[in-house]
Image (cartoon, rainbow, N blue to C red):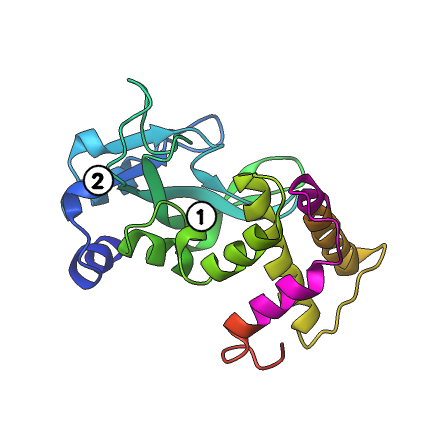
């Protein structure tokens, strides 16, 4: 279904698609089942890569709970590879992950053992911004229309260059605006979700200072974000 959606609905050239699957370890076997389905769907063996748990495993969310191997789908951007070992999962930017399917088939217990679940399912993660980025031929999600106006605003206020800091300010400020505008009415504090919000704002301020922004900039950036999202998120 993932392959069908990408190639038939979104019309992404199948030759640009590579996938990764779990290579197996002491906790769970090599995922030949997923690899077999990819081959059946039309992905050639040379574009199927086996990666370790740090790359192709999800969960559990805490110390214990449901988890399992995943398979991740990458689009070749056309960028030159960074070397002979460049492959999906490399951070050079040649391959962008568009989607993943998590096979929830284990429960990690308090002893650290991975016990097969009686009821198994597939969890899926596909970011709409990543998808828009790829369909529009952009380099990163920060180049699409929901980020560009915010980055332009930050650039107009900056006295120094720093692409990474600009991205962090844009991303963290958007998260802070969404939290503040949520019906839960979270405010900055020392504990719980209020502390998460406080850290997002503090990190934004720190990176703004690296850009030479020393005024009370958060209101201006927040207003730019609200203007982009208020139609879809009236609570803002």
Q: Is residue 43 shown to the viewer in this render?
A: yes
Q: Nearer the viewer, mark 2 or mark 1?
A: 2
Question: Is 79 located above or below residue 182 in the figure?
Answer: above
Instruction: Depth check: give the residue in front, 174 or 179.
Output: 174
First reached walking from the N terminus: tag 2 or tag 1: 2
Q: Quadrant of the C terminus?
A: bottom right
Query: Residue 169 in the image: x percent, y percent?
Result: 62, 50
| Dominant secondary structure (helix, strand or loop) of the stretch shown in magenta | helix
Tell me the residue at 28%/17% (across/down).
Answer: 84
Instruction: Depth check: give the residue in front, 112 or 97.
Output: 97
Instruction: Depth check: give the residue in front, 143 or 119.
Output: 143
Residue placed furthest toward the top: 84
Query: Residue 77 in the image: x percent, y percent?
Result: 27, 40
Q: Which residue is mark 2?
A: 36
Tell me the residue at 43%/28% (across/down).
Answer: 52
Query: Residue 31 in the image: x percent, y percent?
Result: 33, 36
Question: Is 19 located above or below residue 192 in the figure?
Answer: above
Q: Which residue is mark 1?
A: 105
| SS label for mark 2 | helix
Q: Is residue 215 magenta?
A: yes
Q: Which residues are magenta?
A: 206-226
Q: Is residue 212 magenta?
A: yes
Tell me the residue at 49%/61% (across/down).
Answer: 149
User: Do the residues bearing badges 2 and 1 touch, measured as CB atoms within 8 Å?
Assistant: no
How would you rate the neighbour count of disc 2 (Cα within 10 Å): few for under 14, some for 14-19, many for 20 or more? few
**Mark seen at residue 140:** none
Q: Is residue 60 shown to the viewer in this render?
A: no
Instruction: Depth check: give the residue in front, 28 or 179.
Output: 179
How would you rate the neighbour count of disc 1 (Cα within 10 Å): few for under 14, some for 14-19, many for 20 or more? some
- Quarter assignment of residue 179: bottom right
């Amino acid at each position: 279904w993932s392959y069908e959606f990408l190639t038939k609905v979104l019309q992404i050239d199948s030759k640009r698609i590579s996938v990764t699957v779990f290579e197996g370890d002491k906790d769970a076997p090599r995922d030949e089942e997923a690899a077999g389905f990819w081959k059946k769907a039309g992905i050639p063996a040379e574009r199927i890569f086996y990666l370790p748990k740090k790359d192709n495993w999800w969960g559990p969310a805490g110390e214990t709970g449901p988890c399992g191997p995943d398979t991740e789908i990458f689009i070749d951007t056309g960028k030159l590879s960074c070397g002979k070992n460049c492959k999906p999962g490399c951070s050079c930017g040649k391959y962008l992950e568009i989607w993943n399917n998590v096979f929830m088939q284990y429960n990690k217990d308090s002893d650290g053992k991975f016990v097969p679940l009686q009821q198994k399912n597939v969890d899926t993660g596909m970011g709409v911004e990543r998808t828009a980025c790829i369909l529009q031929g952009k380099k990163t999600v920060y180049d699409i229309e929901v980020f560009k106006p915010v980055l332009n605003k930050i650039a107009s206020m900056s006295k120094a260059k720093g692409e990474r800091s600009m991205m962090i300010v844009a991303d963290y400020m958007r998260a802070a605006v969404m939290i503040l505008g949520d019906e839960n009415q979270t405010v900055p504090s020392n504990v719980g979700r209020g502390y998460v919000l406080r850290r997002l704002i503090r990190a934004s301020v720190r990176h703004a200072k690296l850009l030479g922004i020393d005024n009370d900039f958060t209101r201006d950036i927040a207003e730019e974000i609200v203007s982009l999202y208020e139609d879809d998120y009236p609570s803002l």
